[in-house]
Image (spheres, helix red, strand yellow):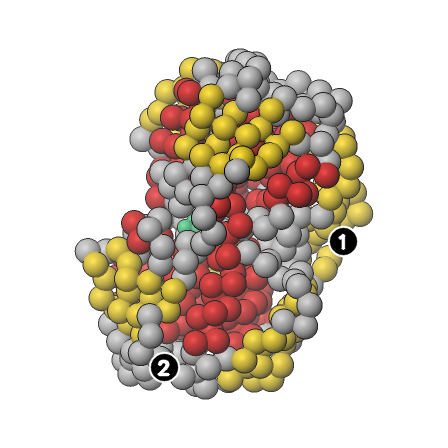
Amino acid sequence: MSGRLDWSSRASGPLLGSVRVPGDKSVSHRALMLAAIAEGESRIRGFLEGEDTRATAAVLAQLGVRIDTPSPGERVVHGTGLHGLRGTAQALDCGNAGTGMRLLAGLLAGQAFDSTLVGDASLSKRPMRRVTDPLALMGAHIDTRDGLPPLRVRGGQPLHGIRYELPVASAQVKSALLLAGLYAAGDTEVIEPHPTRDYTERMLAAFGWPIVFAPGWAKLSGGHALRATDVEVPADFSSAAFFLVAASIVPGSELRLQAVGLNPRRTGLLEALRLMGADITIENEREAGGEPVGDLVVRHAPLHGVELPEALVPDMIDEFPALFIAAAVASGRTLIRGAAELRVKESDRIATMAAGLRTLGTAIEETPDGAIIHGGSLGGGTVASHLDHRIAMSFAVAGLVATAPVRIDDCSHVATSFPGFLELTSGCGFALQAIT
Ligand code: S3P
């Protein structure tokens, strides 16, 4: 992780232009992992050059996988086959990445060797029992520090499939179990309380593993093989989200976001913003690499508060920090419920957004599973990112319409998911600067 870096965001003129945000983080992690244990050579295009996904690549390299970088955003992974990973006595550092650690826990549970997964200060506070408990039901042996990282995964444990109903909607937990299921005897079946992103399921099928799945449900059996395949990573909807909110709230704006992944399990924010009055259209809708993609064209529009339908929550779980900003400048009240998961993300996102917005003068009430946000105008001030990339980028958007500059302290973690954010945003008119 790079050193401390503060940003200052100021009122800006219209945001204009056409941008391509970096590749999808979820897809990039999964592409690396499946390619690593496939037979043959897989090429990944549009790979996210973020710190999270690079950490996963580095872990796989430590496990003996050769990964070439012919050009930025491209990886060629020389798969080892299902049983070709090699153990290492060194700790495997997942950095800031919950997805990396939780999915790798599933993958490593079925290996012949021991391994230890560690993370940075933020990841070291995130709950891991949600994966280690069901993995234990499959026969895995993983020690935690009272439910927190590091994870010590014992090798050589014979796994067996289970039927598991997830208590919380989590694509990471579902994916960890499916990856362990590749190594398990019999069927592994997962049932979710709400459907979550299905990239693992789609990608397993693309790599030739027999799997059946439908929204909220997936089932596979162990003992097959993955065949190398090429993966085209769409632009990350979660990164596009900051531009969708920014252009919606800055008068006169019109932005085109190119080739954004539009998997329906990711696009809840689109619906939420439209309910609030946003003007967003989808153009050039098509399929790329088995995923729906399209250009999003967003124009400024006056927003009004809403009671956010709870059913949208899992489909926009990473977009809440951006939505909080939209709600803070919308007219009237926005009510968010059913989003307790926000409290265990890279930071407690309900608390960090509430604290930052209060600093900027917003009336906001925190609830255990959401917030009530009274929209109005934003003032300036200094807000804390709590080393959470999405909090930093959300307050960068807030500054664009604030009556005085917004300083965001320590934005170094933005590179976990969005390398080049400053350059890309400046190019379309954000008055955003690094403070040295
Ligand atoms: C992710 C799933 C979500 C999401 C995270 C990425 C994934 O986490 O918040 O950014 O790639 O599977 P949960 O599984 O904890 O909901």
Question: Which image quarter: residue 44?
Answer: bottom right
Tell me the crowding category of disc 2: few under 14, some 14 to 19, or many 20 or more residues within 10 angstroms, Cα based.
Answer: some
Place of residue 409 in the rendered image (x, y in percent of width and height, measured from the top left): 45, 34
The mark tally for this picture is 2
Residue 192 shown left or right of residue 242 in the figure? left
Instruction: Determine whether, in the image, residue 343 is placed left or right of residue 330.
Output: left
Frontmost of labels 2 and 1 is 2
Q: Secondary structure at mark 1?
A: strand
Q: Nearer the viewer, residue 249 or 177?
A: 249
Question: Residue 87 bears which disc, if any?
Answer: 2
Residue 39 in view: yes
Amino acid beneath label 2: Gly
Q: CA distance from mark 2 to mark 1?
A: 41 Å
Q: Can you tell which quarter of the image residue 177 is in?
A: bottom left
Q: Position of residue 106 (x, y in %)?
A: 38, 68
Pick the quarter of the image with the N terminus.
bottom left
Residue 432 spot, x, y in % from top left: 61, 32
Ligand 1 within 8 Å of the CB at mark 2:
no
Image point (62%, 41%), residue name: 422
Q: Position of residue 285 (x, y in %)?
A: 76, 48
The residue that label 1 is drawn on is: 286
The amino acid pointed to by label 1 is: Arg
Residue at screen point 56% across, 37% down:
434
